[in-house]
Image (tube, grey):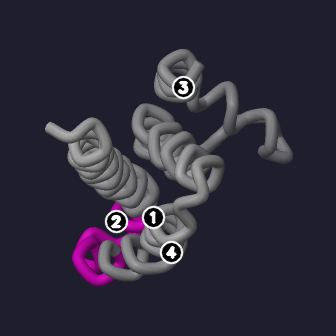
Amino acid sequence: MSLAAAVVIFLFPREIGGLFAQNGAADQVTVTALKLFSFTYLTRWFSFATQSYMLAIAKPFQASLISVCTALVFPVLLIGLLWPLGLTGLWLNFAGTSLLAALLSVGVMAHFIKTRKIEFRCRSGR
């Protein structure tokens, strides 16, 4: 579904923007913003899923780490880094935050899997 949403937003930004414009025609800024924002849908789902999974298995630290980084740390960091790009940098912030959150989630899951294997070996006596 994320891939479908990204494709639709990327291919039809003028039509989507036109739904919210008073005269029905989206300007170029809206089209550019939607195209840049569409990339967010490719990776954002992974951090949501990982955060929910960590909460479900009673790992609140890992879930909170993903949440705080996604809501505060990554956006603030990227605002500073993308500042020279102006408005384009602002729209890239969403995609960048989404990508960094996905990478953090991969790291959290990899650590969890590695730790879980160690615990399993200890319990089985190997």
Q: Residue at x 29, y 83 (%)?
A: 80
CA distance separating discs 3 and 1: 24 Å
* Helix, strand or loop under label 3: helix
* Mark sitting earlier along the chain (3/2): 3
Q: Earlier in the sequence, mark 3 or mark 1?
A: 3
> Which residue bears the numbered disc 4?
68
Q: Is residue 80 magenta?
A: yes
Which amino acid type is marked by label 4?
Val
Front disc: 1 or 2: 1
In 3D space, how far apart are the residues under numbered discs 3 and 4 (Cα atoms)?
23 Å
Q: Are there few (<14), some (14-19), or many (20+) residues within 10 Å of tag 4? A: few
The answer, for residue 103, to whether it is visible in the render is: no
Residue 125 magenta: no
Find disc 2 in the rendering and name its residue.
89
Q: Residues within 10 Å of mark 1 (few under 14, many from 20)?
A: some
Res 2 label:
3
Question: Dot 2 surroundings within 10 Å: few (below 14), some, or many (20 or more)?
Answer: some
Range of residues picked out in magenta: 79-90
Q: Main secondary structure of the magenta part?
A: helix
Q: Dividing the picture into quarters, in which one does residue 4 lie?
A: top right
Residue at 49%, 45% (x, y): give it: 50
- Quadrant location of the C terminus in the rendered image: top left
Side of 7 where 106 appears, left or right: left
